[in-house]
Image (cartoon, grey):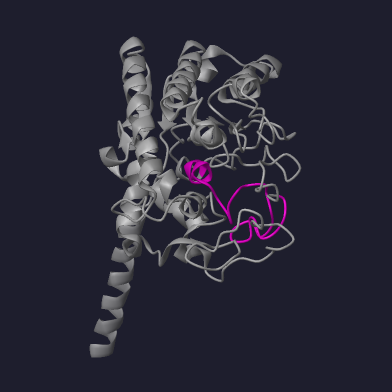
Amino acid sequence: MGMATTASNRLLLAIVAAVAAAAAAPASGAPPAFRRVYAFGDSFTDTGNTRSTTGPYSFGYVSSPPYGATFFHRSTNRYSDGRLVVDFLAEELRLPSYLPPYLSAASDGVGVNFAVAGATAIEHDFFARNNLSIDITPQSIMTQLAWFDDHLHLKAGSSKEEVADALFWVGEIGANDYAYTVIARDTIPPKLVRNMAVQRVTTFVQGLLERGAKYVVVQGLPLTGCLPLAMTLARADDRDNVSCVASVNRQSYAHNRRLLAGLHELRRRHPAAVVAYADYYAAHLAVMRSPAAHGFTEPFRTCCGSGGGAYNFDLFATCGSPEVNTSCAQPARYVNWDGVHMTEAMYKVVAGMFFKGGHAYCRPAFSDLLARKAQGKP
């Protein structure tokens, strides 16, 4: 009798657990909020438009191992050991596949990724006029807008309704503008770069809205002063309260403040659209303040790098080069992958903050954007 009762209790508990799990899981039969996503940005978002032969200086080995080793087990020309934020976005939206890069021959059943590693907010001609065009990626954010136009023109049956139904994801853009002009600060001060870069980004978003976009998410800059590249090049006394480069992080903060003001104005002028701000700076800062809470034991060292020391980074022997064809044993413990880009683990944490962190990391909250889409009310 006791054994039979125990077995019955176990069966009952199993049934209750199964019912609870089913209730907690997303309804697989429910249609996804978005069936198509269009993405833009630089190497933090690029899923394959750049290869080793076209990559930025010192990071021209993205087609080589160990890039992609953690998730794809081969290089997919993503600047990480695996998935990026935009890939976790595809998973969050339950898209059947990740976004194909524009320069591939893949179809756009789920959308297209126009992001390019090394891309700038400011047009390439500006850098060329100031003799800063050597080894600089020629594509800017406005190049990507032109590619989007070409894509719509060539895609049979595309319509403004289809554009209105899609999600537009604008990955971080602008960090390269500051990096490319750092050697010319006497003639091109950071404030000028900030004003020009943010103006180009807001003009780009305005262009998307004019083409019929109704749902747009724009990422700000991360803590660029916490990247091993910046940490290696900066003075040792230029540090903030999370031990990163203070001057560089102030630059990113000022950039984001100006970008927020620009997005506020776009919301005012386009009340029928949702223009959300994904606060990369706040998400990155939360990790750097409490890395262990997010699963990281190495907030500063490069996982795939060389040189040892505090940062394990050498600008002349970077990830994927003949000198660096292996990575750390546990990338999931590292924030930084190659000295400029993040590990898949870090991108997953940041993506989770954007999608599940409410208004703290995305404003309006990503859940609110999805709810408004489901209701058909931008």
Of residues 326 and 154, the one nearer the viewer is 326
Residue 145 in percent (x, y) is at 58, 20
Of residues 77 and 21, the one nearer the viewer is 77
The part of the image, by quadrant, that contains residue 198 is top left
> Which residue: 70% across, 51% down?
61
Q: Can residue 106 be seen in this view?
A: yes
Q: Bounds of the magenta span? A: 63-90
Relative placement, left or right, of 354 versus 233 is: left
Residue 371 in percent (x, y) is at 33, 31
Q: Can residue 355 be seen in this view?
A: no
> Which residue: 71% across, 57% down?
321
Residue 271 in percent (x, y) is at 32, 13
Tell me, yes or no, whether the highlighted magenta stretch contains residue 249.
Answer: no
Of residues 34 and 230, the one nearer the viewer is 230
> Which residue: 36% across, 54% down?
237
Quarter of the picture containing the C terminus is top left
The part of the image, by quadrant, that contains residue 27 is top left
